[in-house]
Amino acid sequence: MKKLLLGDEAVALGAINAGLSGVYAYPGTPSTEITEYIQNHPLAKERGIHSRWCTNEKTAMEAALGMSYAGKRALVCMKHVGMNVCADAFVNSAITGVKGGLIVLAADDPSMHSSQNEQDSRFYAKFALVPCLEPSNQQEAYDMMAYGFDLSEKLGEPIVLRVVTRLAHSRAAVEVTEPKAEKPFSPSTDQWVLLPGIARKKYVALLEKQDAMKQASAESPYNKAESAVSKTGILACGIAYNYVKEALGNDANLVKISQYPLPEEKIKALAAKCDELLVIEDGQPVVEELVKGLLGAGYPVKGRLTGDLPRTGELTPDNVAKALGQATGAVFAPAKNMAARPPQLCQGCGHRDVYTALNQVLADYPEHRVFGDIGCYTLGALPPFQALSSCVDMGASITMAKGAADAGLFPSVAIIGDSTFTHSGMTGLLDAVNDKSNITVIISDNLTTGMTGGQDSAGTNKYEAICLGLGVEPEHVRVVVPLPKNMPEITQVIKEEIEYKGVSVIIPRRECIQTFARHARAKKQ
C-alpha cells in the first residue's frame, strides 16, 4: 500500500510499523511533525505508544534510553541544536550501549530557515562513535526505521538518523509495510553504571565494535556505487543523491552514501578509476574532510571547502547542477520585483502588549539592556519593537542578564517564553536567586509552545510555584494580563520590579491568539 507522506511522517510511520513503544521529543522545526504524527495515529493510540512532549531534549534522550533499558524500541526526536542539549546523555549512551533499539532523530536545518546555526549532526555520530543513517528520500526515511532498530539491537548501540529540512518537509509516495508487534518488556541485565572503572571497560568494548559498524556500512543497501564514463567521481550524500540524478540521470560515476561510517572501500574504488572526486553533501563538509584524509593530500577532492559548492546554505538543484557543469539558469530563483516581508508577531498576540509596555518603561532608562530568548517572542527584536539586545540559545536570557548585572549593568532585563523557561531557564533563575542578582525576569506565558505550532508547554499553570520553589520572594512574583486596557497596571508593575534590588519575576499571561482561535473553532464543532 502506498501513502503520500512528508519525510517526517515517513519517519513516524516507519517507527510505528517497526514496533515502536515510545517517542520522546521537544518540539523544534523541522522535527516537530514526527511526534505529532505518532500522537494522532490510530495504531499508536491503540497500542498506547508513549508520545507526550518532554521538557527538553536531554530529558527526552534519557527517557528514551530508559525505555531501551527495559527492552523496548524508542525514538528520540529533535532539531540539530537540540543535539547540543542532549549531548551528555547521547554520548554516554554509546558507552552504556542499548538493549531495545534506540534511534536518535536529528533534523538539521541548512540555510537556517528557523535556526541559529547550520550545525551538522553527523559530527555527533562520529564523535560518539555510533552509526548514522541519512535517507535520500521519503521511502528510505520509512525503511530506515525498521533497518535502524534492527541494527541498533544487533550492535547494542544507539543509531543516529539525520534528515534535513528539505526532506523533512517535502512529500512523496511511500510503500508501507504491515506493522510489527512491539518488543516484550525485558529489562537489561547488563551493567549501565558509568563509574570510571566500568566506563573504561565499556569504552574499550565500544571501540571493538567499530569494525562491525564499518562492515555494516560496507554491506548496507543504502550505500551503493553507480558507474558511467566520467573522470570525475561523485560522492552523493543523503538528499544530494536526488540532485545529482536530476542533473546527470544515469550518466554519473558515483557512490551514494546514506550510512556511516563511510564505505571506505567503495570510495577508494571510485577514486581509483577517476581523476578527482566531487563531494556533494547538505550541511557542513563532513565527508569532504574525511575523504581528504582517506585518500591523502595528493588526490584532488572538491566540494564546499574548495568553493565548487557554496560554503553555506542548503543544496539546491541549481547549485548542484552548476558544480556538475550542467547549469542552465536559475530555475529555482526567487520571483523578481517581490518585496520582502519580514516575519512579525501575530496581530492580537500578547507578546505585542508586553513589548509595548516594556519599551514604554525602559525609555526612562537609557542604559538598559533586554536579553531575549528562543521563541516567537524573539520577533520583538525586529520593528516595530526593536526591544532585544541579544538572543543566543535556549535559556540564555536569564543567565546573560545575570552576568551583565554582575558586571554592573542596570537595568538588566530577561524575557523568556513559558516553554523555554522550563526547557532551560529554571537553572539560570536559581543561579540568580542564589546570587541575589539585580535582574528582572519576564516569563511571557502564552500557555503553549507557540513557535512550533501550539504543542503543550511542560510548565503550564505551574510557573508561579516553580519561581517560588526556586526562591524568588513571593511579593516579587507578579502576574499580569497583557491587554491594551491593562497597560497602566503592566507598566507600573514593570517599574516597581526594575527598581527592586534583587530577583523579580513578572508573568504576563494570555493564551496564544492562534491556539485560542483553534480552541474556539473546536468548541463550535
Image: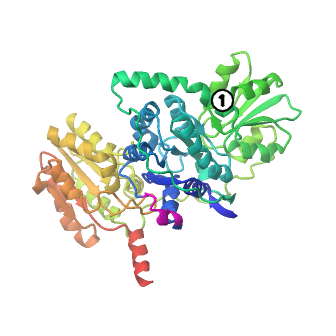
Position of 109 with respect to 381 (left or right) is right
On screen, residue 347 above or below 477: below
Nearer the observer, 409 or 126: 126
In the image, is residue 48 part of the stretch drawn in magenta?
yes
Mark 1 residue crowding within 10 angstroms, few (<14) / some (14–19) / many (20+): some
Q: Quadrant of the C terminus?
A: bottom left
The residue that appears at 51% across and 36% down in the rendered structure is 157
Colour mapping used in the image: rainbow
User: Given the current orientation, which residue lies at the most extreme right position?
Assistant: 229
Amino acid tagged 1: Gln
Nearer-the-camera pick, 192 or 59 = 192
Q: Secondary structure at mark 1?
A: helix
User: x%, y% of residue 512?
Assistant: 37, 67
- The stretch drawn in magenta includes residue 357: no
Task: Check disc 1 and report the residue beneath it.
Answer: 215
Residue 16: give x, y in percent of width and height: 55, 57
Note whether 157 is above or below 391 in the view shown. above
Instruction: Please say whether residue 110 is visible from this viewpoint.
Output: no
In the figure, residue 325 lies in which quadrant?
Answer: top right
**In the image, is 505 to the left or to the right of 32?**
left
Q: Is residue 127 above or below residue 298?
A: below
What's the magenta region? 43-51
The image quarter containing residue 279 is: top right
In the displayed structure, 345 sits above or below 185; it is: below
- Residue 498 is situated, as x and y percent measured from the top left of the image, at 17, 51
Residue 444 visible, this orientation = yes
